[in-house]
Amino acid sequence: MKRAFLLITGVGLLSACSVGPAYKPQSAASLGVPDAWSVSAAPSSADLTRWWRTFDDPVLGQLVEQAATSNLDIAQAMARLRQAREALVGARSDMFPTVSGSAGYSRSEPIRGGGATQTLPDGTVVTAGSGGRSSVSLGLDASYQVDLFGGVRSSVAASRAQYEGAGFDYATVLLSVQSEVARNYVLARAYQAQLENARASLAIQDDNLEIAGFRVQAGLVSSLDAEQARASRAQTAAGIPQIEQQYNAAVSRIGVLTGQAPGALKPMLEAARPIPVGPESIAAGIPADVLRQRPDVRAAERNLAAATAQIGVAKAQLFPLLNISGSLSANAANFGDVLDTITGGLFAGLSQAIFNGGRLNAQVRSSRAAADGAFAAYKSSVLTALEDVENALMALRSANERQRQFAIAFDAATNSAILARSQYRTGLIDFTTLNAQEASLVSARNGLVQARSDRATALIALYTALGGGWDSSVAPTAPN
């Protein structure tokens, strides 16, 4: 008994050993994260979980939330997350013994002869049957590999990190789809505004063409004015089909992103609405926030943790393996006696790789190289995230300024066009001057629409760059 206790204690102490490196999360400094942004940004953090609600557009909110439940890329990411969970379950099973059972029953009957004969008084010969024989057997086998040097535990740690990484990959896809839906929605509303502008400009140019025609008939101007008016009108009309094609592409893309046919949303979006405005600015927090808020960064960190654990799996193969197996068996002629006699056996075996041509050492070096690559990928994802935020901050600032300037330009161009149209009617200016003022108005009007669209798009990009669109305090898990 004492020896058995010492053996179990020794095995327990050995199984607590681990030859792999202990994983430690990287500090912000080691990843090159600065203390502050290089562009001006509010240091406080905003609530980014449902950022699309800040645009105060119920249609946009409905489409984004519909995509979160119906998008097929998100469905694929969830399937990969479920696969990763089952892989973790499989890895954990190696920590427990494997037990299998067997049962058997057989019966034999004589086919010919084999029995004693007896002659009865009346002369009849009777052969006494030897009877059949039956056999019942039960068996139980168990085997267990003692995790002496932490190879199994390292494998479980790697699978757990991969499962968590798959959850963050799922969140990354979710955020990307949300951003894409919102961006295409803004484009669709911008194209509607451009179509409205083009049709309004076309109506004005129809009026100009009519006025030029009257003046030509009256002999006040040459036919050059009418031809210029006709050419301007045709150029404006030629741009309308292109805008309609772009609008159709944006609406079709939203349909597919929400898991529907390309044209499913056309009736819903047919009525024109203004381009979503959103808040004036967003609190970007500090650069270190991206380590927590961005799911792609957290996925890269989990990949590094998994790669580090794989080093332990590879190193454990260099050390002895202890396997313990046992069996129980019982045999009897009938079911009632099957448990009367039970035999069993216990076996422990120790194996050690002696020569393998350097394969095991190569696996260790390969695992270390994979961990180095995972660290580089992690750091790259962090720096890319910082770049995304700063670019989005600058894009939003630029769009805000452009919108202010185009608003001034549009107001001035509108006044100039009204004045030029009045002067052309009275013959104070020629059609070339009127056409230039009309073109300036069209350019300013479309520029203002584009600036508003760019501003909304920059807001969406900033929300996405900051990791908005999910609850970063809860790691995504696969549903049961």
Image (cartoon, grey):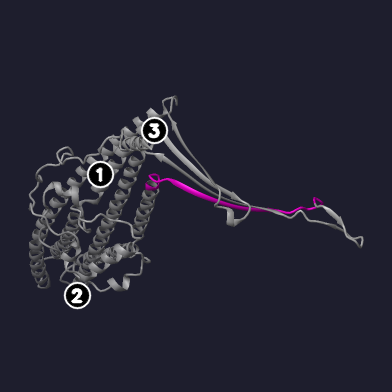
Q: Which residue is mark 1?
A: 301
Label annotation for residue 317: 3
Quarter containing the N terminus? top left
**Residue reaching furthest right?**
123
Magenta stretch encompasses residue 106: yes
Magenta stretch encompasses residue 465: no
SS class of the residue under badge 3? loop
Answer yes or no: do the residues labelled 3 and 1 have beta carbons within 8 Å? Answer: no
SS class of the residue under badge 2? helix
Please state which of residues 155 and 339 is positioned toward the viewer in this rendering: 339
Residue type, mark 2 in image: Phe
Ranked by sequence position, the earlier of labels 1 and 2 is 2
Q: Position of residue 39 (x, y in %)?
A: 9, 47
Give the left or right position of residue 403, taking residue 471 as reference. left
Residue drawn at (13%, 56%), measured in percent from left and top?
399
Q: Do we see residue 13 in this rendering?
A: yes
Question: For the magenta stretch, what is the residue range?
Answer: 92-114
Give the left or right position of residue 147, taking residue 397 as reference. right
Residue type, mark 3 in image: Gln
Separation of disc 1 and disc 2 at Cα?
A: 74 Å
Ranked by sequence position, the earlier of labels 2 and 3 is 2
